[in-house]
Image (cartoon, helix red, strand yellow):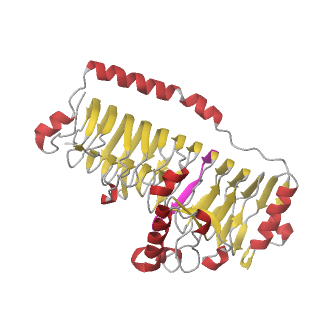
Amino acid sequence: MVSASKLATTGAAAAMLFFAAATTACRAAAAESVAAGWDALPALLASIQAPAFPDRQFAVADYGAVGDGKQDCHQAFAAAIEACHAAGGGRVVVPAGDWLVRGPIHLLSNVNVHLEKGATIRFSADAADYLPLVLTRFEGTELMNYSPLIYAFEQENIAVTGAGTLDGQAGPKNWWSWKGRGGPQQESAIQDLGRMADEGVPPAERVFGEGAQLRINFVQPYRCQNVLIEGVKFVNSPMWILNPVLCTNVTVRGVTVDSHGPNNDGCDPESCRRVLIEECLFDTGDDCIAIKSGRNADGRRVGVPSEEIVVRNCRMKDGHGGVVLGSEMSGGIRNVYVEDCEMDSPDLERAIRLKSNSRRGGYLENLFVRNVKVGEVSDAVIRINLEYWGETGDFPPRVRNVFIENVTSQKSNMPLYLVGLPERKIENVQLLNCEFKNAKKPSVLEHVEQLELRDVSQPRDE
């Protein structure tokens, strides 16, 4: 067992210490924990079932929609969805064409909005089109805000599927300009929202929307069951793209996300249980996949973790991280599985990333990663940082039981960056059969207990 709380991280001696073998007892205990975790995966996968829909078709054109890219189809889409729902469910069909929608699409139970090949739905970039306000989350805090582009509240058996494209039409002149220096009102609103959450103001009284410039997410099922997003492509999102919140039984399959705006995370399950993300391509302006569970006081108030989440057979290109846990993890994250993924881009910063701080708090436990091929990342291949943003508070997060197996990388700045807190060390991290080629620097290890490295190497090409 390697205790890394004071391990030096520079020079040849540090490299030798870093790749030291663990004791036999620690190896045996860690191997037992890994086996138990992966053995639970088949039953978890069997419990995640995509919803099925009645064999009924509701073509949006039959409700007045025109796919010429000019006529507003918002009311026609809403009418088709309502008719499908009232009939007991089925498929709302969007054929090839350019469909302009000036307002949100609100899904109802037992409705699958299906985009045929050649179909593009273009959403208005006028924030006023997304009124009235709905209960939503902004970066993990509940509030009343503009509706997400696609939204569902307390529905079941819902889907967006097909071979078409959904275009949020966000860009530097509209939604994206609300971020940072381009939108000072957003920063003020973020502070106001955080203060309300800290003071216990009920979410229904946290009223934002017009003038506040808090951007909206692309797809957000809220308190829903049995959700399917399959096959479609998402581009130009105002903010996070796929953000199920407080949902159970979610499948995201065969989706392409190509959106490079600020905070354009690809898929952010938040306080969700039983989620499968597979066979997707993420090329994003922020984290490709980021698992979350609420922010600060509001995350602790809701108190619902994200758990039983599987990511497999996905490709990650640009982004801040490939598979990320946090930083809004105040409700906790546990039992996450990542396998058979490929991550590669000079503009991908990390492959596996865990982030929190003592203001966010929460816990991350039981992360299982295996068979991940990393081409190039610009920072660390595996990064755990409990000093994220330098924020401090009274809620030191707990990170424990992280198992990494058969991970290879071809180029990085460093293999590992594992930084815990003096008062709450990172606990029980195991790497088995991993190879980190052509890393520029040694790893950084601070405040880590029970670190095992077995068959781990850091070779350099001659």
Quarter holding the N terminus? top left
**Residue in the image at 79% along x and 59% along y:** 92
| Residue 383 image offset from top left, x and y in percent | 33, 47
- Image: magenta residue range: 249-263
Is residue 149 in sight in this rendering? no
Q: Is residue 271 left or right of residue 57?
A: left
**Residue in the image at 23% along x and 26% along y:** 21
Q: Quadrant of residue 367?
A: top left
State the predominant SS element of the stretch in magenta.
strand
**Residue in the image at 59% along x and 33% along y:** 44
Q: Nearer the viewer, residue 146 or 65?
A: 146
| Residue 26 image offset from top left, x and y in percent | 30, 23
Quarter holding the C terminus? top left
Is residue 346 in sight in this rendering? yes
Q: Nearer the viewer, residue 330 or 284?
A: 330
Judge whether residue 262 is colored magenta: yes
Q: Is residue 80 left or right of residue 28?
A: right
Q: Residue furthest right?
A: 87
Judge whether residue 196 is colored magenta: no
| Residue 186 image offset from top left, x and y in percent | 47, 75
Q: Nearer the viewer, residue 453 or 424?
A: 424
| Residue 398 image offset from top left, x and y in percent | 38, 42
**Residue in the image at 27% along x and 19% along y:** 24
Q: Is residue 145 left or right of residue 436?
A: right
Q: Nearer the viewer, residue 278 or 364?
A: 364
